[in-house]
Image (cartoon, rainbow, N blue to C red):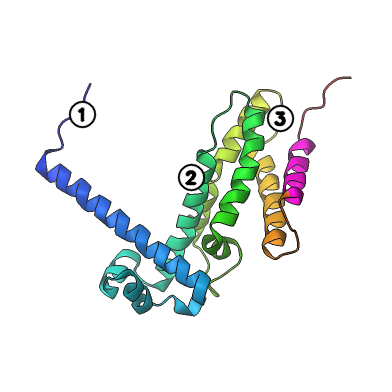
């Protein structure tokens, strides 16, 4: 069964939405680049508008105020992380899929330093994401929960709440990445060791 034709109005609305999304993405990119290069004081509506080539009215309309912009950046960062994880090719074996998610998460963190600093390092002093934003942020990592649940069902991991394992994995990953970003670790070997150790803690013991 094919969907009904969009018609002129439907096509116009789709085009308008695409233009809106493209501009919103560009504004967020400008903002996060300013945050990374010039610090939080650079995140003024006037500065962002000048860099993006638009009016401040457009930015106020999209984000409301500076707090709204910060929350949009916070959520965009987690959305980008979600896309990194979802792009990991599906494996037949869920345990192999789980072990492949670890390197992908590290790559996401290192590839998006501006967003990472906002999400995990309080790059904007005084900014506190709303409870709704925190809930949506954690939901962006639900692929970990799903793959861990598959590993439990397949008998690779002990029966427990998937989120319990996912949060332990996340905590270990964040610790290693924070040390790496601060220059205390030179490469990803410690990251691999601690994330692997977490998964091993929950593995089903094989009978001898």
| Residue 69, picture quadrant | bottom left
Give the mark toward the camera: 2 or 3: 2
Residue 159 - label: 3
* Residue in the picture at 16% in, 43% down: 11
7 vs 153, nearest the viewer = 7
Secondary element under disc 1, as helix, strand or loop, is: loop
Which image quarter is the C terminus in?
A: top right
Measured from the top left, where is residue 198 in percent x and y? 75, 42
* Label 2 vs 3, first from the N-terminus: 2
Q: Give the mark, 3 or 1, whose residue is nearer the N terminus.
A: 1
The residue at the far right in this view is 208
Q: What residue do we see at 45% from left, 62% from top? A: 73
Q: Nearer the viewer, mark 1 or mark 2?
A: 2
Can you say whether 148 is above or below 129 in the image? above
Residue occupying image coordinates x 70% and y 46%: 168
| Residue 83 image label | 2
Mark 1 to mark 2: distance in Å?
Answer: 28 Å
Provide the secondary structure element on which disc 2 rests: helix
The picture places residue 165, in percent across and down from the top left corner, at 69, 41
Instruction: Name the residue located 48 percent from the left edge and 51 percent from the top edge.
Output: 80
The answer for how far apart the CA atoms under marks 2 and 3 are is 28 Å
Magenta-highlighted stretch: main secondary structure? helix
Which quadrant would residue 146 be assigned to in this image?
top right
Pointer 1 residue: 3
Can you name the residue that lies furthest to the front here?
186
**Which span is picked out in magenta?**
189-201
Q: Secondary structure at mark 3?
A: loop
């Amino acid at each position: 069964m094919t969907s009904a034709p969009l018609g002129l109005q439907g096509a116009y609305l789709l085009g308008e939405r695409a233009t809106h999304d493209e501009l919103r993405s560009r504004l967020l990119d400008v903002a996060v680049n300013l945050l990374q290069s010039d610090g939080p004081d650079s995140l003024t509506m006037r500065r962002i508008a000048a860099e993006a080539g638009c009016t401040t009215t457009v930015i106020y309309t999209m984000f409301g105020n500076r707090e709204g912009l910060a929350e949009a950046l916070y959520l965009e960062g987690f959305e980008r992380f979600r896309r990194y994880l979802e792009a990991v090719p599906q494996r037949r074996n869920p345990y192999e899929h789980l072990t492949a998610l670890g390197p992908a998460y590290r790559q996401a963190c290192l590839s998006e330093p501006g967003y990472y600093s906002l999400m995990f390092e309080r790059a904007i002093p005084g900014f506190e994401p709303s409870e709704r934003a925190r809930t949506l942020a954690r939901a962006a990592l639900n692929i970990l929960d799903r793959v861990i649940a598959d590993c439990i069902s397949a008998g690779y991991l002990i029966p427990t709440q998937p989120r319990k394992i996912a949060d332990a994995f996340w905590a270990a990953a964040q610790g290693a990445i924070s040390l790496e970003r601060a220059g205390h670790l030179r490469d990803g070997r410690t990251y691999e060791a601690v994330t692997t150790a977490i998964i091993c803690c929950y593995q089903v013991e094989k009978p001898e």
